[in-house]
Amino acid sequence: MGKCRDIEHAPLRAQAETVLTDYAAQSRDGTGPRGRKPKKRLSGRNIMIYGTLFVVSVYYLLPLWVMVVTSLKGMPEIRLGNIFAPPVEITFEPWVKAWSEACTGLNCDGLSRGFWNSVRITVPSALFSIFIASVNGYALANWRFKGGEAFFTILIFGAFVPYQVMLYPMVILLREIGLYGSLAGLVLVHTVFGMPIVTLLFRNYFTSLPEELFKAARVDGAGFWGIYFRVMLPMSLPIFTVAMIIQITGIWNDFLFGTVFTRPNLYPMTVQLNNIVNSVQGVKEYNVNMAATLLTGLVPLAIYFASGKLFVRGIAAGAVKG
Amino acid sequence: MQPSIAIKDLKLAFGAVEVLHDLNLDVGQGEFLVLLGSSGCGKSTLLNCIAGLLDITDGQIFIQGRNVTWEEPSDRGIGMVFQSYALYPQMTVEGNLSFGLKNAGLPKAEIAERVARAARVLQIEPLLKRKPAALSGGQRQRVAIGRALVRDVDVFLFDEPLSNLDAKLRADLRVEIKQLHQQLENTMIYVTHDQVEAMTLADRIAIMKGGKIMQLGTPKEIYNRPANRYVAEFIGSPTMNMLDGTLDMEIAPSFSCDIATFALGEYGFAPGTVSGPAWFGIRPEHVESGEAAEAMPVQLDTVIDLVEPLGSDTLVRVRAGGQLLWARANGQPDLSPRQPLRIGFDPARGHLFDRQGDIRL
Ligand SMILES: Nc1ncnc2c1ncn2[C@@H]1O[C@H](COP(=O)(O)OP(=O)(O)OP(=O)(O)O)[C@@H](O)[C@H]1O
Ligand SMILES: [Mg+2]
């Protein structure tokens, strides 16, 4: 029997042996491919990729450059007209003025008032909306309760209704409960409008966690809040970061709700910025305007820089399961 | 003695899909029951119902004589081990073990003592301060078992606890689980679709198919007297040879099919068996070949089709007429395809099944 098989495979084996000897010869005299395959640095494809990336980054960075240099120039230098030129004499005067002296229609204490208003709006709005939405998402993902599916569908629908449709009813509602024109009212509006998208985010994240973990916690006797705080929360840092960023930047950048639902002395930073830039008295102080704009954008920018990596991780995690 | 777990007319449906149909099952005190079945037959679902992790549609569940049908999982007196370990990733091993005890509000000293005891039994003492991510698969599964152990409960539920492990580790942990059971003497329900695990661990095996229990019995019973064709073909590897033919009970019982006709004098018939179309099944390990075949009441001349050497013994597939049959030969006989081979078997070791209902005759 053994013989029979040998005869059958004889040609194959002969072939294998020749191949083997070939390799042996090549490696002995150091010729033939070996190790990692070399990559060409300057191939047509690479030039294309890096070229495109370069052009796109310049396109995005140029306006920022203009803003930064302009905000550091004095007015006489600006009037010369070289908007791309770096400042000959660096001055921080415009930044100081934008922060504490610029006039916004009624008063002339700069953006500082708006900054603190925005802080007082953004912090509670973001905290409330993220807390409520995360609990919602957790309940929807893990505790299959009656009507949960219907609730979720309505919520998703809510995410696609344009805000403008709901502005007027919201004004009436706030007036009726006596919160119109107050910070609390605006916080409520932000919390409510942030709900659909953030809930969706959390629900998707929690459904992507293994279900058996939740089951194990139930067998271990943890209740609704026990599982939320002690099992789910510690595993959810990435998605909380994503929600934080989405909410903080969204609320900080909001203009519409800020104008509609508050009074002038409570205007958020964005609305004040608009009032500074568009004020009609006197000459246009471009450097102050640029500085004010940069100041307003500083908060979202700082948040992106601080949490970039976590943000990407969270987005990827939330996208695993729909 | 009252059963440790009693399930009465259990029904479970996901919406319109009924997964468990009027299931009845009693598990004795200290019994090791294995639920065995192919994927999707409802094993995990049944286990989750017992644990209280799924709301049942109808029926009742008793644990230690107490009706727990509406009780929370943590109040049922069960511990559960999952396939994916399901360890809390942010807690240390110690935190994982003590989580349930803290929730139950046990005093600190008691918690420490129970954790220490479980760690000793499972030999995970050096790992107590580590996070699950820093453990190997086998160590994780030990911690998961430990989490059930510290609860000091009468009933353990295992849902395929070893199927994420490699073959070697699986065999080791299988032995450990068996030892653990002998040591603790509590009731265990163990879900698997590995028949070796089932045969080696179980006091009794429940074979499930499509949400029903096809047969409930000791491993020997299941192997020696399968209640129907499904069970017969599910247990054993390679699967039982099945011959399609006719049973004749008129004068002397005999079975005839296209490759052979033989008498069934010694076969233990079920009462009331009548003639008719039937299956005759014979396990590969009961099909002898070579010299041993000469001594058998039924002999066939066949041609070898395929040889699978396993080391300890050799599987041979032979062709007889239009049929392919498996035989298991001891040791490492010198066989190769296309050679003739004489096989033989004793019909008394076979299994007859009614062609209509696939029920054992
Ligand atoms: N949440 C659910 N909704 C609808 N059907 C489900 C749900 N969970 C399980 N099923 C169905 O119930 C049946 C039994 O599932 P179960 O998980 O109990 O199978 P299993 O025997 O454990 O299988 P496996 O060996 O693959 O784990 C399957 O057909 C499955 O599709
Ligand atoms: Mg399962």
Image (cartoon, rainbow, N blue to C red):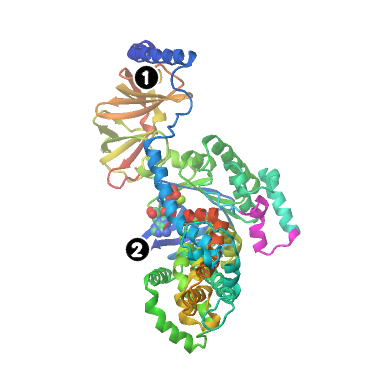
Could you say which quadrant of the image residue B294 lies in? top left
Along the line of sight, the residue nearer the viewer: B320 or A122 = A122
Left or right: B349 with respect to B109?
Answer: left
Q: Are marks 2 and 1 in contact (CB under 8 Å)?
A: no
Left or right: B312 with respect to B299?
Answer: right
Give the Cα separation between the discs numbered 2 and 1: 57 Å
Residue bounds of the magenta highlight: B90-108
Membership of B337 in magenta stretch: no
What's the residue type where badge 2 is placed?
Ala
User: Residue B16, which numbered label?
Assistant: 2
State the residue at coordinates (31%, 44%). Answer: B273
Secondary structure of the residue carrying tag 2 is loop
User: Residue B224, which numbered label?
Assistant: none
Membership of B93 in magenta stretch: yes
User: Residue B294, which numbered label?
Assistant: 1
Of the 4 image quadrants, the one containing the C terminus of chain A is bottom left
> Is disc 2's CB within 8 Å of ligand 1?
no
Along the line of sight, the residue nearer the viewer: B25 or A193 = A193
The answer for which chain carries disc 2 is B
On the same chain: label 2 and label 1?
yes
What's the residue type where badge 1 is placed?
Glu
